[in-house]
Amino acid sequence: MTQYLRPFLVGLQLDIAWEDKAVTHERVRDLLEGQAFPRGSLLALPEMFSTGFSMNVPAIAEGPDRPTEHFLSSLAAERGIFVLGGVVNRAPDGRGRNEARLYGPEGEERLRYQKIHPFRYGGETSYFEPGSQLALFEWNGFHAAPFICYDLRFPEVFRQSVRDGADLLIVIANWPRPREEHWMALLKARAIENQSYVMGVNRCGSDPNVSYSGRSQIIGPRGNILVDAGEGEGLFHISPDRDDLIAYRAEFPALVDINPAFLGERMEL
């Protein structure tokens, strides 16, 4: 009998070519060369993966040709997988929108999520419009919620996603080396407190402003580190087990004990 592999949850940690979409797109293809994943796998790329964390919105926004969106769509269709990656678009007022876009195995757009918490310390609030809505999509039996970088410091949005049904939390990021310990601690905290799988997909290398240590991780619902990608470029993956997650939540039903008196009304973002 033929044994079919479960779809993989895959992250790609890469060194982004500063404000150069074509070069970075080619780098992604090079890193994927010779790699095969079961159909329906989910590949996640970092925040602003094709340009780096730049405030130069006129230079990095997609524009009418939409090169990064077309790249993500074609990559998904060529490989028969889901692809999630960071893209910059324009808001009506001219500011940027720091987005995560999801494309399905036929290349179709499945989801858009706009970063809710622009990074004030890095000047992002001056150049990018904050998002106002969480997002959720189904993948391989999971309910997955995407987040972007600085969102990781705000546990309330993760909790709300879990209350909406999320059990896989994906954080795409350009998280710098000086705060590496915060990155790892917060990823683990979000997994433990929400009894969910958490994947953090960071960049590595450096840009004109700061260096990045990578340390992308996949963490299980018990808070155990399943994968640590280290500091260099490369792919990392697991086949997450939702049955195990459900069994763990039933065995240790912490989420059932959330006290509604301290939640208030559903948050309107």
Image (cartoon, rainbow, N blue to C red):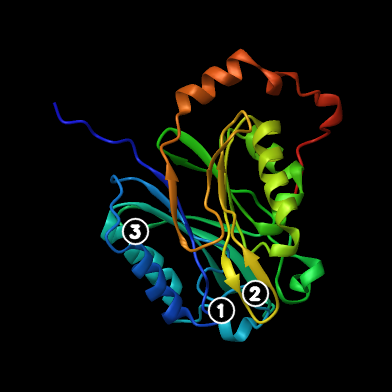
Is label 3 in contact with label 1 (beta carbons under 8 Å)?
Answer: no
Is label 2 in contact with label 1 (beta carbons under 8 Å)?
Answer: yes
Whole-number angstrom distance, CA of label 2 to CA of label 1: 7 Å
Location of residue 118 in the rendering, given as x and y in whole percent from the top left corner: 73, 64
**Quadrant of the image occupied by residue 262:** top right
Lower sequence index among marks 2 and 1: 1
Location of residue 37 in the rendering, given as x and y in whole percent from the top left corner: 31, 49
**Quadrant of the image occupied by residue 194:** top right
Question: Residue pushed farthest bottom?
Answer: 59
The residue at which mark 3 appears reads as 76
Location of residue 31 in the rendering, given as x and y in whole percent from the top left corner: 37, 65
At label 2, which amino acid type do we have? Gly
At label 1, which amino acid type do we have? Ala
The residue at which mark 1 appears reads as 61
The residue at which mark 2 appears reads as 96
Compared with 169, 122 (above or below) is below
